Image (tube, rainbow, N blue to C red):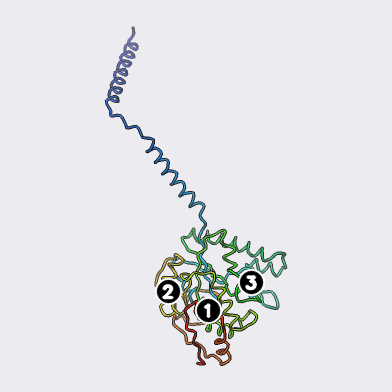
């Protein structure tokens, strides 16, 4: 027997001894309790609940925020203040099927507006195309802003739905076209109908027939049908107490609030800025009303319903 054989036998003996020691030590360890079937089922149930939460999150619709207001109701001022909130981006006066901007005469230079160019080119089914373009653009824009930590707000051109043509729509076309794809959060801003109507008349924006005050109030009431009271903000409340009202707006739309909006809102570019030109937020005196309009207002049944719905004072005077 040579030296290598002896050393190999010794190593084998030492390995066997070590293995016996490990086996003995393991046998002395306390046994782990066997999990009961109830505990196993509870664990599986918890795991299923977690998976369900994740799946629900994946299935949930993205949120889209939309503000609505009729023309000459202070909507541009409020929109500027919303745009001035932190990380908030507002797209102003959206309505893909309106033709108010086209006007008469030669086509306008619109190099980035595919829908308008499609109308100039007389494409078939252009309204259907316009909605598809808009929905695709909103989807891309929303994902872009979300990646950058921002919040997207759409300002609908509500006037095109309710105050253009012989007949108003029943509900917002923008909401109807987006609600299948998004969880839509709505906010409406309103102003006393007398002030709105007078301003619209001065701007030559009575795009409906007949152009009577009662017809306007009828359309105003139709516009309000889609909103609950908590979704409605009064322009008069805003100019009287802007911080309080902006806090409420931020809460309704789940936007970050900062009182710094007061210092910067005038810097934001928002379409439809036909009213006040100053950078102040303050009540405005009602314009003098002619006698014939006062008579029309007092005779309007829809006006009586509207001021009751919005809790406005119905009294009107000549000055």
| Image position, residue 189 (x, y; %) | 50, 74
Q: Is residue 248 left or right of residue 188?
A: left
- The residue positioned 52% from the left and 52% from the top of the image is 59
- Camera-side residue of 84 and 223: 223
Q: Which label belongs to residue 245?
A: 2
What residue sits right under mark 3 in the picture? 98
**Within-10-Å neighbours for mark 3: few <14, some 14–19, many 20+:** some
- In primary-sequence order, the first of circles 3 and 2 is 3
Closer to viewer: mark 1 or mark 2: 1
SS type, badge 3: loop
The residue tagged with tag 2: helix, strand or loop? Answer: helix
From the top left corner, tell me how far across and down residue 290 is, in percent. 56, 92
**Can you tell which mark lies on residue 139?**
none
Q: Using the numbered discs, state the Cα–Cα distance from disc 3 to disc 1 in whole angstroms.
A: 26 Å
Q: Give the CA distance from mark 3 to mark 2.
A: 31 Å
Q: Which residue is mark 1?
A: 306
257 up-or-down from 207: above or below:
above
């Amino acid at each position: 027997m040579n030296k290598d054989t002896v050393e190999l036998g010794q190593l084998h003996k030492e390995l066997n001894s070590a293995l016996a020691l490990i086996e003995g030590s393991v046998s002395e360890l306390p046994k782990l309790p066997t999990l009961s079937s109830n505990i196993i089922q509870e664990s599986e149930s918890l795991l299923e609940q977690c998976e369900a939460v994740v799946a629900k999150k994946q299935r949930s619709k993205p949120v889209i925020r939309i503000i609505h207001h009729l023309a000459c109701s202070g909507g541009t001022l409020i929109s500027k203040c919303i745009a001035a909130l932190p990380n908030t981006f507002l797209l102003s006066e959206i309505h893909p099927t309106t033709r108010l901007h086209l006007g008469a005469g030669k086509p306008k230079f619109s190099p980035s507006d595919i829908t308008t160019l499609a109308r100039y080119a007389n494409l078939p089914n252009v309204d259907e195309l316009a909605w598809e373009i808009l929905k695709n653009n909103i989807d891309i824009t929303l994902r872009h802003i979300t990646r950058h930590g921002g919040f997207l707000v759409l300002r609908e051109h509500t006037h095109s739905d309710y105050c253009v043509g012989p007949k108003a729509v029943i509900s917002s076309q923008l909401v109807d076209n987006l609600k299948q794809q998004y969880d839509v959060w709505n906010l409406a801003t309103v102003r006393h109908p007398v002030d709105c109507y007078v301003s619209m008349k001065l701007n030559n924006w009575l795009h409906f027939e007949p152009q009577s005050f009662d017809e306007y109030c009828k359309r105003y009431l139709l516009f309000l049908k889609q909103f609950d009271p908590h979704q409605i903000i009064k322009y008069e409340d805003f100019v009287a107490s802007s911080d309080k009202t902006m806090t409420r707006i931020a809460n309704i739309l789940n936007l970050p609030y900062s009182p710094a909006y007061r210092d910067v809102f005038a810097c934001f570019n928002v379409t439809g800025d036909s009213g006040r030109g100053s950078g102040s937020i303050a009540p405005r005196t009602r314009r003098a009303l002619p006698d014939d309009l006062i008579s029309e207002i007092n005779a309007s049944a829809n006006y009586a319903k509207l001021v009751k719905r919005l809790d406005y004072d119905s009294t009107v005077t000549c000055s």
